[in-house]
Image (spheres, rainbow, N blue to C red):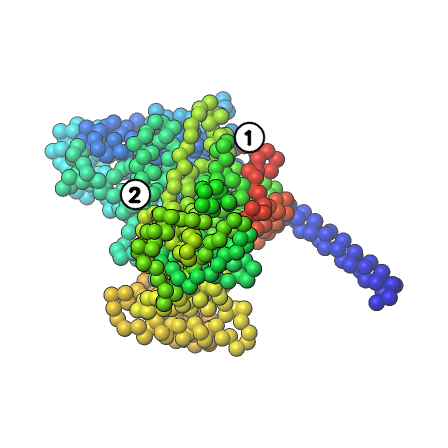
């Protein structure tokens, strides 16, 4: 190329670069114009922007709510448990109050109804959350019952619940007795009057609704509506939806693991406990009203040590499992040691060599994601430590510093939410949210693969190993090697949880002028020693990890790889699991799922789709056994139907999906695939009906609304089409909000590696400091 041509090319590139830059600025300007919010007007009705309502639409005077002390004489054990529960502390505890009070200061008391419908319901329904006559806002506590938070007469007076989110329940005036037709009889009756007609008391305060997961969903599914943020519906957490689509609900066939019996919210959070002082006890037991979950901060603030201890024990009870699964030689990327209890086939690790440990963290027993809810404030992370034979630390990730702050390079399970200017929201001001920039969590029954790179010490002559069918170590050799661990390297992995991140703890406690150390709970732990003499042995695994069968370890590893879009390695891991447990049809189906995900990247012959079909056929040919449940067969048939549809056999796929949907009518993904298949076949009325079924399961499903817009229009239902379009625009993810996330990552490139699922933590990893001041949304 001549000099003139080179200069012309250079000039052309400069012009193009300037045009791109100007275009980028124009896009940002358009985005800023679109997202410029005008604050919504104060709500006109007494309950908005909450979804909560009273039966008659009127307020309920505060004196109509019975205090918890009214129930004490007959329900002593229930009252004792409730008095230390988060429900009791919901309105007053400062870690909530500080965030809610920012909304009070910046928007006005009417807007706090959104939060208080679940945290301070008596204040909402009694009309306390209004501006005073002088225009000055009131401060909490708003009513004499704020100290009781969610008190007995709130939950036991709720008559209807929907799954719309954030206080989506209907309540009536509390009553202690009800007639046979359910009509409440109002008045503060004496204990003798109640005991004389216990069935009437049960009719007044108990109903099947209270035992349903949908009842819990009213406050454990969160939505920030346009009436709060002046923008659109922003989804928050939804422990209910996660449960409903998990293997615990028995309502879905798509989970990787299925519980032997259906488990709902009460099974874990309201188990039967011994009771000697409660008239509601049956055979000496009542449902626990401690509602143990993961909050160690609120009870500790009030000195409720029994609740703190019970919560810690609950978190340690095999909720999670951690497994130091394998070592990989970085120079070749090969697995050099699959770390199990008895190993052979020795492979030397050279001094100074870099290796990567792959740690699998599995959400074994939580029927929702971990962490489940306020991930922008909670702090959960993986700690990984490598020690030499003398106990000296070679590598440490996920440590807690002297000031209580977490190592900035830790592998954290958290969420970053951004306001319209791309600043991180650090005080849970969800009313300013525009987009979720980062969200790392482990869904129910799923796993995460975490990678840590470190160097073998120069003085070490260690041998790692992987399992070989022909070589095993005797138990006497194992015991001898552990007693005399010359040149041993210890690998230790832990999953830690702290209720709140230390920065927010410091903020709240400084405002409260209090000093408090929130406990760090070690939820799972595993330790592996690489010993001279050729033994790699996993020891000291907490909970069920030490007894996890090999096929399950491989399955968990495959699930983690699949979650990180490592489809080829995931398929290989699932195949290995299937070899180890050949009578389990779910394992070849898992491999088929990975092959189907890979299919989109395959060449025109689409070999992955054919591989998936072969795996599904193999699963369906496994003879009936204790492992082969009807659920497993239907799961295999579901994915076979998706393969048929991809092959152009849409009608066969529709027939199959319709049969599966009849067996599992509440599996929203089966319903969705059926609806979409009917849509492609031109069976529009059938498709419309199925999409409407999805909305009964989840009224916030933007995808269902999107399909219903043309379906209603084709049927001449113009008004319904317009309503579906309005709902779709409010519930869909804002396509322009990605610009905000891009702006955040451009300003904070240290988060770039974390966006890649299969990233590695090492000494050279970027530090991710806590974002405060101008980098965070203002709290005033």
Lateral position of residue 184 relative to residue 553, left or right: left
Quadrant occupied by the C terminus: top right
Query: Residue at the location (43% across, 77% down)?
Result: 649
Lateral position of residue 54 relative to residue 97, left or right: left
State the residue position of label 2: 269
Residue 641: x, y in percent? 40, 71
State the residue position of label 1: 780
Residue 1: x, y in percent? 84, 67
Q: Is residue 337 above or below residue 213?
A: below
Circle 1 SS class: loop
Report if residue 772 is visible in the image: yes
Lateral position of residue 603 relative to residue 634, left or right: right
Query: Residue at the location (52% across, 51% down)?
Result: 456
Residue 166: x, y in percent? 41, 42
The label shown at residue 270 is: none
Query: Residue at the location (54% across, 68% down)?
Result: 601
Q: Is residue 456 above or below residue 629?
A: above
Q: Residue furthest right?
A: 4
Lateral position of residue 425 relative to residue 310, left or right: right
Q: Is residue 301 above or below residue 213?
A: above
**Alpha carbon distance from label 2 to label 1:** 36 Å
Q: Earlier in the sequence, mark 2 or mark 1?
A: 2
Residue 469: x, y in percent? 36, 67
Report if residue 656 is visible in the image: no
Foreground disc of the pair 2, 1: 2
């Amino acid at each position: 190329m001549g000099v003139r041509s080179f200069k012309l090319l250079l000039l052309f590139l400069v012009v193009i670069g300037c045009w791109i830059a100007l275009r980028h600025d124009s896009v940002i300007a358009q985005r800023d114009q679109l997202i410029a919010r005008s604050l919504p007007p104060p709500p006109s009705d007494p309950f908005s922007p909450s979804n909560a309502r009273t039966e008659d639409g009127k307020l309920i005077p505060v004196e109509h709510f019975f205090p918890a002390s009214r129930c004490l004489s007959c329900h002593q054990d229930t009252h004792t448990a409730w008095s230390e529960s988060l429900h009791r502390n919901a309105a007053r505890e400062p870690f909530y109050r500080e965030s809610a009070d920012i909304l009070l200061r910046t928007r006005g008391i009417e807007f706090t109804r959104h939060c208080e419908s679940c945290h301070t319901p008596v204040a909402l329904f009694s009309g306390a959350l209004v501006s005073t006559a002088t225009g000055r806002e009131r401060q909490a506590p708003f009513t004499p019952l704020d100290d009781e938070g969610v008190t007995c007469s709130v939950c036991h007076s709720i008559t209807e619940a929907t799954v719309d989110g954030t206080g989506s329940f209907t309540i009536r005036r509390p009553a202690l007795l009800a007639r046979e037709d359910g009509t409440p009889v109002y008045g503060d009756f004496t204990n003798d009057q109640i005991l004389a007609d216990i069935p009437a008391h049960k009719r007044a305060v108990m109903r099947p609704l209270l035992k349903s997961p949908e009842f819990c969903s009213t406050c454990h599914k969160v939505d920030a509506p346009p009436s709060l943020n002046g923008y659109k519906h922003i989804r928050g957490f939804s422990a209910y939806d996660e449960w409903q689509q998990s293997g615990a609900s028995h309502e879905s066939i798509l989970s990787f693991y299925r519980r032997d019996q259906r488990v709902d919210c009460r099974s874990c959070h309201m188990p039967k406990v011994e009771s000697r002082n409660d008239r509601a006890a049956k055979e000496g037991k009542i449902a626990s009203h401690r509602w143990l979950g993961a909050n160690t901060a609120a009870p500790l603030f009030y000195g409720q040590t029994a609740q703190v201890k019970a919560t810690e024990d609950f978190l340690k009870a095999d909720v999670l499992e951690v497994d130091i699964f394998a070592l990989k030689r970085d120079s070749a990327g090969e697995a050099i040691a699959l770390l199990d209890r008895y190993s052979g086939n020795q492979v030397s690790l050279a001094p100074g060599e870099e290796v990567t440990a792959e740690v699998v963290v599995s959400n074994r027993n939580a029927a929702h994601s971990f962490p489940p809810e306020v991930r922008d404030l909670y702090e959960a992370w993986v700690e990984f430590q490598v020690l030499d034979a003398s106990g000296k630390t070679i590598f440490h990730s996920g440590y807690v510093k002297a000031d209580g702050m977490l190592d900035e390079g830790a592998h954290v399970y958290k969420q970053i939410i951004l306001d319209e200017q791309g600043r991180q929201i650090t005080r849970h001001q969800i009313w300013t949210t525009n987009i979720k920039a980062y969200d790392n969590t482990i869904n129910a029954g799923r796993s995460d693969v975490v990678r840590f790179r470190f160097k073998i010490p120069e003085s070490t002559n260690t041998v790692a190993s992987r399992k070989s069918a022909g070589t095993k170590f005797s138990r006497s050799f194992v015991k001898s090697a552990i007693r005399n661990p010359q040149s041993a390297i210890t690998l230790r992995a832990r999953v830690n949880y702290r209720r709140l991140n230390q920065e927010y703890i410091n903020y709240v406690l400084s405002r409260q002028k209090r000093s408090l150390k929130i406990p760090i709970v070690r939820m799972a732990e595993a330790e592996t020693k690489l010993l001279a003499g050729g033994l790699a042995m996993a020891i000291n695994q907490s909970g069920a990890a030490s007894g996890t069968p090999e096929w399950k370890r491989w399955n968990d590893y495959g699930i983690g790889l699949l979650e990180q879009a490592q489809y080829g390695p995931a398929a290989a891991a699932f195949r290995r699991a299937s070899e180890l447990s050949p009578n389990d049809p779910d394992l070849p189906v898992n491999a088929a799922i990975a092959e189907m995900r890979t299919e989109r990247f395959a060449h025109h012959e689409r070999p992955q789709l054919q591989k998936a079909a072969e795996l599904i056929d193999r699963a369906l040919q496994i003879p009936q056994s204790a492992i082969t449940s009807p659920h497993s067969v239907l799961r295999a048939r579901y994915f076979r139907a998706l393969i048929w549809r991809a092959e152009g056999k849409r009608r066969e796929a529709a027939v199959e999906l319709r049969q599966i949907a009849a067996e599992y009518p509440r599996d929203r993904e089966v319903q969705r695939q059926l609806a979409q298949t009917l849509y492609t076949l031109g069976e529009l009325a059938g498709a419309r009906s199925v999409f409407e079924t999805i909305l009964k399961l989840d009224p916030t499903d933007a995808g269902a609304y999107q399909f219903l817009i043309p379906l209603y229009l084709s049927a001449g239902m113009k008004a319904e089409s317009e309503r579906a379009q309005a709902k779709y625009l409010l519930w869909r993810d804002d396509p322009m909000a990605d610009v905000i996330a891009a702006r955040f990552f451009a300003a904070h490139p240290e988060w770039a590696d974390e966006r890649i699922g299969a990233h590695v933590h090492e000494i050279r990893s970027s530090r991710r400091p806590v974002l405060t001041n101008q980098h965070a949304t203002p709290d005033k």
